[in-house]
Amino acid sequence: MAHSKSEYGQRTGVLGVLLCLALAGPAFADCERPLSVGWESWRPYMYKNEEGRLSGLDIELIQAVADRMGCQLEFSETPFKRHLLQLRQGKIDLATSVQKTADREEYAWFSQTYRSSASNLIIRREDAERYHFKSFKEMTQSQFRLGVTRGYFYGNDVNEYIEKDDGKLHVEDVVSDELNLMKLLAKRVDGIFADPIVIYSMAGDIGRKDEIAMHPLGLVSSTFYIMGSKASVSPKTMDNLNQALQDLQQSGEFDAIVNRYLDGG
């Protein structure tokens, strides 16, 4: 059957539009369902802003990665230690800003690294001249009251000591850095191990940034990853996530996101 030139042009035009849409779409969409991401209040990486909307460096980053993958995300607020348990069980798919450990590698995939930072001892500014620890080992010989966050990794030596908790050092763990900061300001602990960027951001939000100080004692610098549950996330999805993360870094969008929250730091 013969077709008119106008009809042929209309059809080829439609095909051209469909082809352009296909080429413009995600290069590796393989998500048959939304991916679940756990989060807890941890400024400036993840938090609810003044309008009550979920925001932060990690939130923007994982959303940008998902957009490039053609995947939708569902966010679930949960304390970090419970988050790890749910990842192990396959009840939550992803976690951001996670350190790689041998135990976690048993039940999770890890992306390429995307940022690094170090935890420091944070104390009250009024005590800046009181504590002169030069090492964690030296701290363990004191009656210092140390606050840590449950489920966090501070390095092998520190975490092994926390598990035993059989020395002079008194260790108290809570479910979040925010609670640790409140205990520090209330003088219920003498110091806390934390990411200074997080703690100074939290303290600034409540107008008490000048009341805390960073002690010279720092822990080993850590690299951070996006973690995917082996029980619910396929290796292909993690490969695509890595490709999307690499594309973000090469395009400059990754640096733009980081700079919005860390002032280029």
Image (cartoon, grey):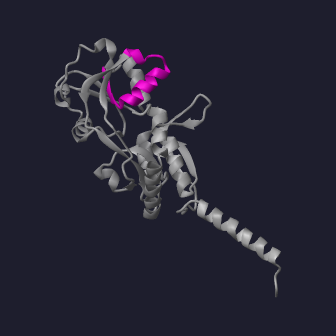
Looking at the image, residue 184 sits to the left or right of residue 91; the answer is left
Image quadrant in which the N terminus is located: bottom right
Vertical comparison of 218 with 157: above or below: above
Looking at the image, residue 111 sits to the left or right of residue 75; the answer is left
Q: Residue 182, image x and y in percent? A: 42, 22
Task: Specify the segment rendered in magenta.
Answer: 190-211
Q: Is residue 205 magenta?
A: yes
Q: Which residue is located at x 39 percent, y 46 percent?
A: 114
Q: Residue 171, image x and y in percent? A: 28, 29
Q: Is residue 6 visible?
A: yes
Image quadrant in which the C terminus is located: top left
Q: Residue furthest front?
A: 5
Q: Nearer the viewer, residue 85 or 43?
A: 43
Q: Residue furthest bottom?
A: 1
Q: Nearer the viewer, residue 178 or 70?
A: 70
Which of the 4 image quarters holds residue 127? top left
Q: Which residue is located at x 33 percent, y 54 percent?
A: 105
Which of the 4 image quarters holds residue 167? top left
Q: Is residue 231 visible?
A: no
Q: Residue 54, image x and y in percent? A: 56, 37
Vertical comparison of 196 with 239: above or below: above
Q: Which residue is located at x 20 percent, y 26 percent?
A: 139
Q: Residue 191, image x and y in percent? A: 31, 23
Looking at the image, residue 148 sits to the left or right of residue 25; the answer is left
